[in-house]
């Protein structure tokens, strides 16, 4: 059974940085997608970043391009999200997810492709 555990959330001031980690277990296949999503109160879940475990191809939401970086350590089954220049609008619960790639790669906007989720970690950015 796939298990994903996020850590690294917290409270920071605007302009600060955080690094989220997602430790995975219970799976073997390496050619999958790992993604970070977030959901703020009263808003829909948003795909933030994704990475293909078989080749390091990444994608980002426009709102975080240039500020967030997704990376992975396959030996540790861990995916990271480095978040710099944080803004109050980045405040949300951040979730890690594992999914399968589409013919066009990892697609956070296609909900049916994501089948395992972590419990989430809170990120709060104050102005």
Image: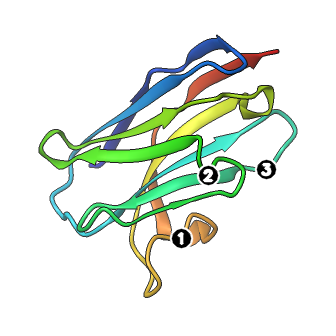
Query: Residue 10, relative to residue 6: is it above or below?
Result: above
Q: Do the residues labelled 2 and 1 touch (CB within 8 Å)?
A: no
Name the image colouring.
rainbow
Marks 2, 1: nearer the viewer: 2
Q: Helix, strand, or loop for circle 1?
A: loop
Q: Classify 2 as above or below 111.
A: above
Front tag of 2 and 3: 2
* Residue at 64 percent of width and 29 percent of height: 85
Left-right relation of 73 to 112: left
Q: Earlier in the sequence, mark 2 or mark 3?
A: 3
Examine the rendered structure and indicate whether residue 40 appears above or below residue 117. above
Pick out the residue farthest to the right. 42
Position in image of residue 7 (x %, y %): 42, 23
Find residue 69 and report its horizontal and vertical position in percent: 47, 44
Q: Name the residue under label 2.
A: 65
Label 2 crowding class (10 Å Cα cut-off): few <14, some 14-19, many 20+?
few
Question: How many C-alpha atoms fall within 10 Å of the one at disc 3: few (<14), some, or many (≥20)?
Answer: few
Say which mark, if any, is on residue 118. none
Question: Which image quadrant for residue 38?
Answer: top right
- Residue furthest left in the image: 75
- Mark 3 lies on residue: 44
Residue at 65% over, 47% down: 64
Q: Circle 1 is placed at which residue position? A: 107
For the point 72% across and 50% down, which residue is it? 63
Is tag 3's residue or tag 1's residue first in the polypeptide sequence?
A: 3
Kindly indicate the quadrant of the structure image that contains residue 17: top right
Quadrant in which the C terminus appears: top right
C-alpha span from label 2 to label 3: 19 Å
Point 47% across, 84% down: residue: 104
């Amino acid at each position: 059974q796939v298990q994903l555990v996020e850590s690294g959330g917290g409270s920071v001031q605007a302009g600060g940085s955080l690094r989220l980690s997602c430790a995975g277990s219970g799976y073997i296949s390496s050619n999958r997608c790992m993604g970070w999503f977030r959901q703020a109160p009263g808003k829909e879940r948003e795909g933030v970043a994704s990475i293909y475990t078989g080749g390091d191809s990444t994608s980002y939401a426009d709102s975080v391009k240039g500020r967030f970086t997704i990376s992975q350590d396959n030996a540790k089954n861990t995916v990271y999200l480095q978040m710099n220049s944080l803004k109050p609008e980045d405040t949300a619960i951040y979730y890690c997810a594992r999914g399968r790639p589409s013919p066009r790669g990892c697609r956070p906007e296609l909900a049916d492709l994501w089948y395992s989720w972590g419990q989430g970690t809170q990120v709060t950015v104050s102005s």
